[in-house]
Amino acid sequence: MKMIRYAFWAIVGLCLILIGLANRDAVTVRAMPEALGDLLGLSPDLQLPLFVVIFIAVGAGLMIGFLWEWVREHRMRADARGKAREVEALRREVDQLRGAAAGAKGEDDVLALLEKTG
């Protein structure tokens, strides 16, 4: 299984290297359109290799997707925390009832319940 995982990541790495080599040309990344930049008197732009722009865009898309899912699953995580608290409270209550039913006699739980009902 580890060999398959290593082979997969080797193929992914090779693909990324090939994409980087094929897209080495510099591109201009602008923060705003030229007309608006000329109007405001500032034109923030950056010269980057195309593969860097591609990798940044993919990374930003992944981060936005992860954040979106984390926000979407908030209700499910809150419900799970509530259920866990409820289970722990019930577990404490059962332990307390077992201790009270057995009392100082040190009896078995089933025997103690049978004596109570009989």
Image: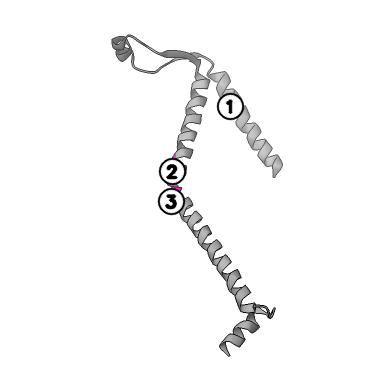
The label shown at residue 71 is: 2
**Towards the viewer: 12 or 40:** 40
Bounds of the magenta span?
68-75
**x, y percentage for residue 50?**
50, 19
Q: Quadrant of the N terminus?
A: top right
40 to 89, vertically: above or below? above
**Towards the viewer: 115 or 58:** 115
Residue at the spot of label 1 = 16
**x, y percentage for residue 8?**
64, 37
Query: Which quadrant holds residue 21?
Result: top right
Question: Badge 2, how many Cα within 10 Å: few under 14, some, many 20+?
Answer: few
Q: CA distance from mark 3 to mark 1?
A: 37 Å
82 to 10, vertically: above or below? below
Secondary element type, mark 1: helix
**Label whose residue precedes the other's in the sequence (2 or 1):** 1
**x, y percentage for residue 46?**
45, 14
**Towards the viewer: 24 or 66:** 66
Query: Which quadrant holds residue 40?
Result: top left
